[in-house]
């Protein structure tokens, strides 16, 4: 009899856990008789998604576009700032406290400023998504550069390598695992920034749909929006993981937790 591979077994367990979660949710709602206004059943949410998808699709595309735009801008800015900080101790000492302070500011307090400066709509959502996803990229890129061994840098300098050569050929490649780890965090935060802005000042997007639905006490529609956000987040997380395996396979450790 052919045995199941460890990878397939792990995927089957993950799928089983997900299906079991929704089945348990459905059964508990039916057994307890909880109102739809409190907690709708997964089957009700699925019905809303099926019936309202033509209405939800433009809002879903808007949220996805806004999130990706803010995410790309945030990653680009985070890499530049992280390289500048990680390659200079002076820049690290001067700039890092400012970044920590800025990251500690609740982003809900920044959205009204973006609305005043740029008006309501897509631009504040993109900027909020960008701002909220910068910090994890900066921290991980700077940490990756700082992890380069001083002895290795000394050897390369003796061999005639310039500082730019060391950064390009040694520092940045060693930073890739840290960068991709930050991308997984940043992509989820980017969705948070987008939805936050859409709930405050936008007329299109999943956040707007959820605000209108909550005002109308349409809780199944609110959960449908949450399901769409979760699905998009998982999909982009999977894309980041795939890119990480392709580009940083040399840094991946064999999964010893999987039983043969």
Image (cartoon, helix red, strand yellow):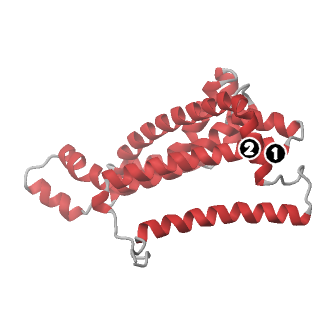
Would you name the residue on which mark 1 appears? 220
**Where 169 sits versus 27, above or below?**
above
Q: Are marks 2 and 1 in contact (CB under 8 Å)?
A: yes
> Which residue is at a point 57% across and 62% down the rendered structure image?
15
**Where 241 sits versus 195, above or below?**
below
Q: On the picture, is 165 further left or further right than 243?
A: left
Q: On the picture, is 86 further left or further right than 31?
A: left
> Which residue is at a point 65% across and 61% down the rendered structure image?
19
Q: Nearer the viewer, residue 245 or 120?
A: 245
Percent of width and height locating residue 40: 83, 52
**Where 152 sits versus 213, above or below?**
below
Most extreme residue toward the front, as rendered?
A: 1
Figure quadrant of residue 48: top right
Q: On the picture, is 145 further left or further right than 70?
A: left
> Which residue is at a point 86% across and 41% down the rendered structure image?
218
Q: Nearer the viewer, residue 79 or 258?
A: 258
Percent of width and height locating residue 166: 20, 50
- Disc number for residue 224: 2
Residue 104 seen in render: yes
Total residue callouts = 2
Percent of width and height locating residue 22: 71, 60
Q: Secondary structure at mark 2?
A: helix
Residue 99 seen in render: no
Figure quadrant of residue 76: top left
**Where 86 sits versus 30, above or below?**
above
Most extreme residue toward the left, as rendered?
A: 159
Marks 2/1: CA–CA distance: 6 Å
Q: Dot 1, crowdedness within 10 Å: few (<14), some or many (≥20)?
A: many
């Amino acid at each position: 009899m052919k045995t199941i591979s460890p990878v397939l077994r792990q995927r089957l367990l993950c799928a089983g856990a997900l299906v079991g979660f929704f089945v348990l949710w459905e059964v508990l709602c039916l057994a307890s008789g909880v109102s739809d206004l409190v907690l709708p059943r997964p089957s009700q949410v699925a019905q809303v998604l099926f019936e309202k998808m033509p209405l939800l699709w433009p809002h879903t595309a808007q949220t996805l576009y806004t999130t990706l735009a803010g995410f790309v801008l945030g990653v680009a800015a985070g890499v530049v700032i992280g390289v500048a900080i990680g390659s200079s101790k002076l820049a690290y000492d001067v700039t890092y406290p400012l970044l920590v302070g800025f990251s500690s500011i609740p982003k809900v307090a920044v959205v009204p400023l973006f609305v005043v400066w740029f008006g309501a709509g897509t631009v504040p959502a993109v900027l909020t998504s960008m701002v909220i996803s910068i910090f994890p990229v900066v921290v991980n890129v700077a940490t990756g550069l700082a992890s380069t061994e001083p002895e290795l840098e000394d050897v390369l300098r003796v061999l005639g390598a310039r500082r730019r050569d060391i950064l390009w050929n040694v520092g940045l490649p060693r930073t890739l695992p840290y960068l991709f780890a930050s991308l997984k965090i940043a992509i989820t935060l980017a969705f948070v920034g987008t939805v936050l802005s859409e709930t405050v000042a936008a007329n299109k997007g999943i956040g707007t749909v959820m605000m209108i639905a909550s005002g109308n006490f349409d809780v199944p529609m609110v959960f449908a929006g949450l399901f769409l956000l979760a699905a998009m987040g998982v999909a982009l997380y999977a894309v980041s993981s795939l890119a990480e395996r392709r580009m940083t396979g040399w840094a991946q450790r064999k999964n010893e937790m999987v039983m043969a």
